[in-house]
Image: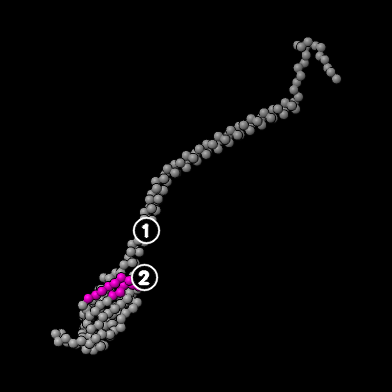
Amino acid sequence: MIRINLLPEEYRKAERTSPKVFAAMLASVVMVCCSVGWFGYVYVGELGRLEMKVLQDQETLTTLTPQVAYHDALTRETNDFQARFQTIEQISKSRALWTPVMDQLIDTIDNVQDPDRHVAWFSSMQVRDGKGTRGPEVSMPGMVQGDNINRLTYFHDDLERTPFFENVSEVSLPQGTFVKDPKRRPAEAFRTSLKWSFLPTSEWK
């Protein structure tokens, strides 16, 4: 059905918006405004919090950077020290420490405490480097004074009791040739030659 309003325009009644439509529109506007406000609050607040955290992290990083550099320097120095230590240790293991060996050998040969047990002297000492799994080899020609073969045996026994003998793998038998020289007093002696084979220097105790 079509309605025609023939009244002049100034006498016509304005059509009002339905209350339900107005209420719905108002609620929509309020919700949109609240949503925008909440989003703005959350966005600005979260952004501020993140900016503050970034500043704190940058300050912490600035504080820790020198410590990290110092730690890295200490780590490099520790690695260098360990490398040098291992090198020195390998060199020390590959070298024979002959000073204590010679000291113990001389003390045994001199035999100051019990000269009646044996008196010995040597004309030379030869040392050859070991090869492969063999250690150094020592050869010492000399004399043990007296006409009693037991003195030669005692001398060998005393040598085998010295600490350095733990590093000896092979040793010659206590044997010698009886000789007599009127220029000596006593003239009798046994000519002998000590021959030892040591363990590889890396296995020395």
Disc 1 designates what residue? 83
State left or right for residue 109 relative to residue 33.
Answer: left
Residue 137 shown in magenta: yes
Residue drawn at x 35%, y 77% as measured from the top left: 169
Depth order, front residue of 192/78? 192
Percent x, y for residue 35?
63, 33
Percent x, y for residue 40?
58, 33
The colour scheme is one colour
Q: CA distance from mark 2 to mark 1?
A: 26 Å
Under tag 2, what secondary structure? loop
Height in image: 50 above or below 155?
above
Percent x, y for residue 194?
27, 79
Q: In the orientation shown, which residue stands out farthest toward the right?
A: 1
Would you call the spot at circle 1 few (<14 residues within 10 Å), some (14-19), or many (20 or more)? few
Residue drawn at x 67%, y 28% as measured from the top left: 29
- Give the residue type that dot 2 points to: Gly
**Which range of residues does the magenta coloring cover?**
124-138
Residue drawn at x 50%, y 38% as measured from the top left: 51
Location of the C terminus by quadrant is bottom left
- Give the residue type that dot 1 points to: Ala
- The rendered magenta stretch, by its main secondary structure, is classed as loop
Height in image: 66 above or below 155?
above
Q: Which mark is residue 165?
A: none
Location of the N terminus by quadrant is top right
Disc 2 designates what residue? 132
State left or right for residue 19 relative to residue 185.
Answer: right
Depth order, front residue of 60/87? 87
Q: Nearer the viewer, mark 2 or mark 1?
A: 2
